Amino acid sequence: MLATFVRTARLMVGLPDYDAYLRHMAAHHPDQSPMDRTQFFRNRQEARYGGKNGGRCC
């Protein structure tokens, strides 16, 4: 219950979910190395506020 609230609150203020990203990478891109937290945060910021591709990998 608390985890759902935290995830929802983060999404409401625009903080991406790094753990969900890691699960996605493991499930869909096991041959690729995931970004570290800092790279991931910067990537999400770029995608949200100035990215050219919308930030989606697939």
Image (spheres, helix red, strand yellow):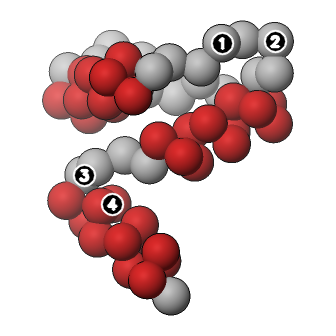
**Residue 6 place in picture, x, y as percent:** 36, 71
| Quarter occupied by residue 31 | top right
Pointer 4 and pointer 1: residues touching (CB < 8 Å)?
Answer: no
Residue 55, above or below 39: below
The residue under label 4 is 11
Pointer 4 and pointer 2: residues touching (CB < 8 Å)?
Answer: no
- Going 50% across and 88% down the picture, which residue do you hit? 1
Query: From the viewer's perspective, is 19 left or right of 31?
Result: left
| Quarter occupied by residue 40 | top left
Q: Secondary structure at mark 4?
A: helix
The residue under label 2 is 31
Image disc number at residue 14: 3
Image disc number at residue 33: 1
Which label lies toward us, 1 or 3? 1
Instruction: Count up the numbered dots.
Output: 4
Q: Marks 3/4: CA distance?
A: 5 Å
